Image: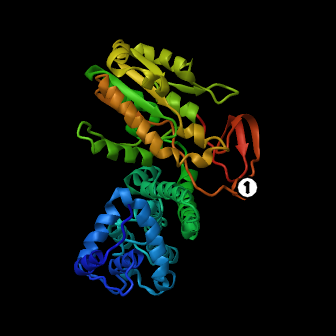
Amino acid sequence: MRFGLTETFWQLVTSRFGYASNTPSIYEFVLALFQTNTPFLPTLLKPDARVLMNRWRVNLRYQDSFRQLSKRAGNDLNLPTLLPRTTLEALLDDNLFEPVEQRIIDELARTVVSGTATPERIETIQKQRQNKYWYLTYQSYYDVLIHAVWIRSLVEAWADEPFEALSEGPERYTERLYRVDNHYRKLVYAYRQTKQAEGQSDLLETVVQAIDAVYTNQWLLPLSNHWQRIVDQTIEWAFGPLQTQRYFFRYQIEPQLNKGRTFVIISDGLRYEWGRELAERMQTENRYVADLSYMVTGLPSYTQLGMAALLPQTQLAIQPGTDAVLADSLPTQGTGNRSAILQKHKGIAISSTDFLALNANREGREWVKPYSVIYIYHNSIDRIGDTLATEQQVVDESDRVLDTIQTIIRKVVNMNGVHIWITADHGFLYQQQPVDDTDFLATSITGQVWKQGRRYIIGQNLKASEGFKRFESN
């Protein structure tokens, strides 16, 4: 049996919504419904039309029809011509059309590139749009813009501040300068999310290119120059014992051992701004109390030395002819060698993969019983970032790393762990654009070279041309 739309039906529509036409049709009514709910177009229907639109828009059963008709109605209402002539403020209350969201983002992007945007302005607009229909589709676009404008703002405020002493570097970085790197990492991550949206990433390409130039030329370069001036004047790489990585076990872990079982999670390449974000995450959960401080690595800053420095030891030495590090003459590479060093303190080393494979409630609790200290080694950041083929993925790994470490922490707690330390062997510097060959120094080294990396050279009786800083071990 087939039913048509009767005169009575249209009378009800007219009475309820104010729609009237000599030749009424469902689509004409829908078009009037869209126009009435568009803040920058004249209203055609009664207030109940807004209630109807709200119910339609939020009903999950009708999402496909809403999106299809939104696109069609936008074209029929001549949005492609209207939007360029409509002010940004007039668009902000719209809750119907995808091209409006794109137009808002495009307008904000222009202000970011021109340098006229402020963090407060972008954040206000982002909050205003958060409950709008198309926001979730474009959330990563807004994230790019807010991180971009914060980078420019912070760089303008801090880039020209010189350092006066060696200790100022880590102190000032951990106090506030880390925020620039944090925003840059999140900008790159958000931008990669926008590139997954079909045909839309060009909206922000100019923004990212502009901020890349700001980050590289106005931040990294002058900051490096200020820091290099201090390093060039430095004879001894010395910091306080609580800030020196090689004293980590002596001053942080050993005094804790008589207070209960201690877990140490070491994430290879976890830099400070990641640690700050992890601490903030943990503090949002009522069951944890998190404190944050910093340590300074030894020189050169690389995995083998950093990992060895975190172990119990009184003397570190680089094995002649290699970059392998000995702790009190014992080898330090691999969990087996590290467990052997930890044994004298009733300790053991384990990979994060093996630790997560333990059942926390059964074998996990039994497994930890003999030990006073457990070192858990996690390695995904450094593994990805240290390989040319995958180094561009290091930013994408960030949220997964923090999630993994939180999973490890929860498992430790389920094994009745109370004292948990999270640290790293070293950090790293990251920029999205590839480093040009001309940015590298031409190496002119004489002497016995044991290991030549991308950032350092280890050896004996080394002499270098201008542009290198030499430190001697003691």
Q: Give x and y (percent) for residue 286.
A: 23, 40
The quadrant the C terminus occupies is top right
Q: Quadrant of residue 461?
A: top right
Establish if 378 lies above or below 129.
above
Q: How many marks?
A: 1
Q: Is residue 406 left or right of residue 304?
A: left
What's the residue at 30%, 25% (across, down)? 414
Q: Give x and y (percent) for residue 233.
A: 55, 52
Establish if 308 lies above or below 464.
above
Q: For the residue carrying disc 1, how many other residues have a C-alpha within 10 Å: few (<14), some (14-19), or many (20+)?
A: few
Q: How is the image coloured?
A: rainbow
The quadrant the N terminus occupies is bottom left
Q: Quadrant of residue 329?
A: top right
Establish if 67 lies above or below 388.
below
The residue under label 1 is: 437
Q: Quadrant of residue 375?
A: top left
What's the residue at 53%, 63% (across, down)? 219
